[in-house]
Amino acid sequence: MLRQNRSEKQMRPKSKHLESFREIMRTGSVTDAARNLGLTQSAVSRQLAQLEDQLGLELFFRDKGRLTPLPEAVELCEEVDLALSSFDRIELLAEDLRNLAKGQLRVVGVPSFVEGVLAGAISSFLTAYPDIKFIVDSRNHQTIVEQAVCRAVDCAFLKLPISHPNLLVEPIVSAGTVCVMRKGHPLEGRKAITPQDMKNEPLILLGKGKTFQRQINDAFREAQVGMNVKVETHAIGASCALAAQGIGIAFVNELMGRTYRGFGVSFVPFRPNIEHRYAFVASSQIPMSRAATAFFSHCKAYFRRSP
């Protein structure tokens, strides 16, 4: 909502004001935000008030010392996060230019990639470049595209297809789909499993509304086999854990499923094959930093060697 006592001449918000606002949104209180920022509570409150005055907006509802974010604050928070990430990128780029032996890499990817195979690529890269520091995050597809375009991150990993005129997109690894089942399942010994093999079998579906689930549905429909769906989930780990309990057969990306082999499950290829392709992504508007270029080359070799 519009702030009533709005100054006629507004100033551009300062980064310290934005940092205080972001920390309040993260923690939910001025007290916790002040502690995390190493400031006094009054200083954080003053910076918030100054930010609201500069923007001409009230961002919080105040009641007996408690702050409740207004819709305007929620909408603003993501843009503030992107803006502050850009400031960090400037500092990191300067450090990379000053000292090529050290630096930092901000990497973002879809959750399944970050929580799965990316760890191995980073670990092996650090063996060769032990002084590089990684900042790793996971976001949804659209947010990753926005961060890569505005150079809030050095590089990203996304599932193909990707289309954006300001992005460098390099396919880097692909994998098929596997059926995940509890060890000892009657279908465990098959070389491959088709929809016909799973007639009346309880199933666990991943990613409601996503392309992958539609592809699974299409495969069963074309085979004229009904689906006995017991569980739907958006998490690969949950799919494998449920399969390990004998609840049903899950369908997962084989590349991402490797992380969960210790769950007491078996993997059998699904046919017809559904391929999952991932790309290394960066802004095409400026050259990558030397550290990012080295990481890209390393990832190409790493995933080429992966079984």
Image: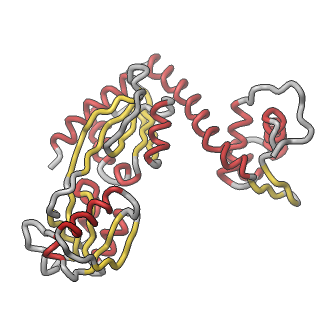
- With respect to residue 65, does 22 lie above or below? above
- With respect to residue 289, does 68 lie above or below? below
- With respect to residue 220, does 134 lie above or below? above
**Residue 27: x %, y % from top left:** 67, 53
At 79% from the left and 55% from the top, the residue drawn is 67
From the viewer's side, name the closer residue of 157 and 197: 197
**Residue 37: x %, y % from top left:** 69, 42
Describe the colour scheme in one phrase.
secondary structure
From the viewer's side, name the closer residue of 158 and 160: 160
Name the side, left or right, on which 210 lies relative to 66: left
Q: How many marks?
A: 0
At 50% from the left and 20% from the top, the residue drawn is 94
**Residue 31: x %, y % from top left:** 77, 52
From the viewer's side, name the closer residue of 26 and 285: 285
Q: Residue furthest right?
A: 5
Name the side, left or right, on which 125 lies relative to 155: left
Query: In which quarter of the view is residue 204 placed?
Result: bottom left
At 71% from the left and 47% from the top, the residue drawn is 73
At 66% from the left and 46% from the top, the residue drawn is 75
**Residue 19: x %, y % from top left:** 68, 38
Query: In which quarter of the view is residue 229 placed?
Result: bottom left
Query: In which quarter of the view is residue 96 placed?
Result: top left
